[in-house]
Image (cartoon, helix red, strand yellow):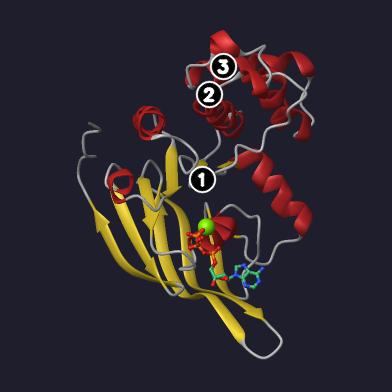
Amino acid sequence: MSKLIKLNNIHKHYSMSNFIVRALDGVDLTIDEGEFTSIIGPSGSGKSTIMNIIGCLDIVSKGDYYLCGENVARLSDRRLADIRNKRLGFVFQNYNLLNNISALENVMLAGKYAKMKSKECKLLAKEALRKVGLEGRMFHKPSELSGGQQQRVAFARALFGNPLLLLADEPTGNLDSKTSKEILKMLVNLNKQGTTIILVTHDMDIANVATRKIEMLDGKVINDIRREKENEIN
Ligand SMILES: Nc1ncnc2c1ncn2[C@@H]1O[C@H](COP(=O)(O)OP(=O)(O)OP(=O)(O)O)[C@@H](O)[C@H]1O
Ligand SMILES: [Mg+2]
């Protein structure tokens, strides 16, 4: 398997008035193509910070980040935006959908940012909605969908155009346990079809479904366990 991500001694510091917050304090990590990784750890341990850096939404204070062999740690905002649009898909806890347009139009936005033609964009958006099992709801607006369905739309938007990597920060945080399991099953299936996934969660049962579990504490990786097969979802 080839190395998709390589983080070398990553630091992220925030200078407050009289002290420094070490949100990431020397993280070394490599992630291969095809892996399904979960990141777990207490609140404030640096999970979102590392996701934002891997997702090119934020830049490091110190260290190097290689994405497909290219050092992206010191690229301009424009280049980072370009990488985000073409190679990465991000899902957050709060769906982040636009409320006044349909599921299909929400997913199509991903193509519009990448300046894609409308016809091609619609085709890919429909394909992404099919992947998450929502083809029957594509003309519904977010308010006409359940929480789990809204999150599926967010996943479809993230999957638009087959990104190299899908990043999800607490995607089931607002969902009940039954709906969380459905989303989780969907992630396992996406991974089996080849999507590389990094998932942040507070929930150990959810973390254990991934084939690799990374534990963070105080801005450091304190545990990194790989499994041959993912656990069953009950
Ligand atoms: N913009 C910022 N300015 C200052 N400190 C920040 C900033 N963003 C994050 N931090 C601090 O960095 C640390 C790591 O935050 P992060 O959001 O990565 O935690 P987390 O593990 O995602 O927590 P949670 O589980 O609550 O989402 C925290 O101590 C937080 O207060
Ligand atoms: Mg967080």
Q: Is residue 73 above or below residue 156?
A: below
Picture quadrant of residue 221: bottom left
Residue at the (56%, 19%) spot, across then down? 129
User: Which residue is disc 3 drawn over?
Assistant: 127
Q: Position of residue 205 (x, y in %)?
A: 28, 45
Q: Secondary structure at mark 3?
A: helix
Whichever of callouts 3 and 2 sits on the residue coming sooner in the sequence is 3
Q: Are marks 1 and 2 in contact (CB under 8 Å)?
A: no
Depth check: give the residue in front, 101 or 109: 101
Q: Label 2 amino acid? A: Gln
User: Which residue is disc 1 drawn over?
Assistant: 167
Q: Residues within 10 Å of mark 3 (few under 14, many from 20)?
A: some
Q: CA distance from mark 3 to mark 2?
A: 16 Å
Q: Is mark 3 within 8 Å of ligand 2?
A: no
Whichever of callouts 1 and 3 sits on the residue coming sooner in the sequence is 3
| Farthest residue, direction top | 136
Q: Is mark 2 within 8 Å of ligand 2?
A: no
Residue at the (62%, 88%) spot, across then down? 19
Q: Position of residue 31 (x, y in %)?
A: 40, 54
Query: Between tags 1 and 2, which lies in front?
Result: 2
Q: Secondary structure at mark 2?
A: helix
User: Which residue is disc 2 drawn over?
Assistant: 149
Query: Between tags 3 and 2, which lies in front?
Result: 2
Q: Is residue 176 above or below residue 4?
A: above
